[in-house]
Image (cartoon, grey):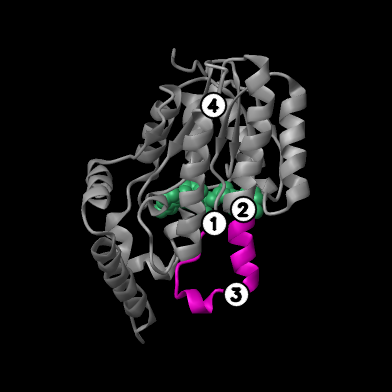
Amino acid sequence: MKPLQFEGRWILVTGASSGLGKEMATQLASRYKANLILVARRKEALEQLKGQLQQAYGVQVELLPADLGEESEILRVADTVIQRGDLYGAILNAGITYFGPHVELSDLEFRRLIQVNLIGVSLLTSHLVKYFEPSGKEAGIMLVSSMAGFMPTPYQSVYSGTKAYLIQFANALQLELKNKALSLTVFEPGGIATEMTSGENFSALRSWLMPVDQVASIALRAFRARKYNAIPGFINQVGYVLSRIMPRKFMVGQLAKTYGKALEFQRKPGA
Ligand SMILES: NC(=O)c1ccc[n+]([C@@H]2O[C@H](COP(=O)([O-])OP(=O)(O)OC[C@H]3O[C@@H](n4cnc5c(N)ncnc54)[C@H](OP(=O)(O)O)[C@@H]3O)[C@@H](O)[C@H]2O)c1
């Protein structure tokens, strides 16, 4: 399969108002000269990014502010980008987490996690695949999952479940595709220094986080090369291998201890 060619092509990036999505959008414009359709809820942040990218790199940028926690909004985004007729790629990156004891997770937070991470990403993927598959068009879709998708992650159990679902869903669907010019890539990063990990709960884990520009660059190379799965960083790749060979209960137990300590540290008075 020949690599995706982004120059002058229209690429959808969800969750582009901050973190990994914003950085991937920036690198798509600066390195690959791609035109962008950017999605997130924060319109002002998207407007600002649009101005910067158009001015600095001469690419075209269109905005589609939307709340991907709402099914009608997911469908509106899908319909809008499909009806254009010129979409070439999609990076489905928008996601949220909850890091803390599961017993403190409210029903509302629980539903938002499922809606944004699971329904938001897989319903969009589903509509895009139904568009690209019969068309025979050259295209790529990348879903941003997480290492938490293959390593059950205590204190982020719902998040971890949503990310595991994305891996199973996309890896299975890719091998159903008859359009050989269409690829589905799953990106599975470990910790990244972004807004998501800027909260106090993550302070004891901060030294593990990879710089966002480095992760975005690896993600785009994997997307372009139409990789089936991609994990950025040597340590994370070692973590993946260990997760396949070590007893699961032992591995997850180590994570539970580390994350549990990080939460206790954050909750200590004066920490
Ligand atoms: N940071 C990490 O350590 C890490 C590790 C592994 C995987 N990941 C994954 O990487 C992806 C990006 O995360 P990040 O670290 O870059 O986090 P981030 O800085 O918090 O960015 C999350 C993005 O998702 C958007 N978003 C959240 N809820 C949304 C909604 N309801 N509708 C539309 N957009 C929504 C946010 O935009 P608005 O708030 O403007 O809507 C924002 O642009 C996520 O899927 C995350 O699970 C992150």
The amino acid type found where label 2 is placed reads Val
Q: Which of marks 2 and 3 is nearer the N terminus?
A: 3
Q: In this view, does 216 lie to the left or right of 84?
A: left
In the displayed image of the protein, which residue is found farthest to the front? 176
Residue topped by disc 1: 96
**Label 2 lies in ligand 1 vicinity (Cβ under 8 Å):** yes
What's under tag 1, amino acid-wise?
Ile
- Whether tag 1 and tag 2 are in contact, CB under 8 A, the answer is yes
Give the mark nearer the N terminus: 1 vs 2: 1
Which quadrant is home to the N terminus? top left
Above or below 99: residue 141: above
Residues 75 and 96: in front is 75
Kindly report which numbered mark, 3 or 1, lies closer to the viewer in this rendering: 3
Q: Which of marks 3 and 1 is nearer the N terminus?
A: 1
CA–CA distance in space, label 3 to label 1: 14 Å
Disc 2: which residue: 116
Q: Which amino acid does label 4 sit on?
A: Ala
Q: Which of 257 and 165 is in front in this view?
A: 165
> Mark 1 against mark 4, which lies toward the viewer?
1
Q: Magenta part of the protein: which range?
A: 96-115
Q: In which quarter of the image is residue 13?
A: top right
For mark 3, give the secondary structure.
loop
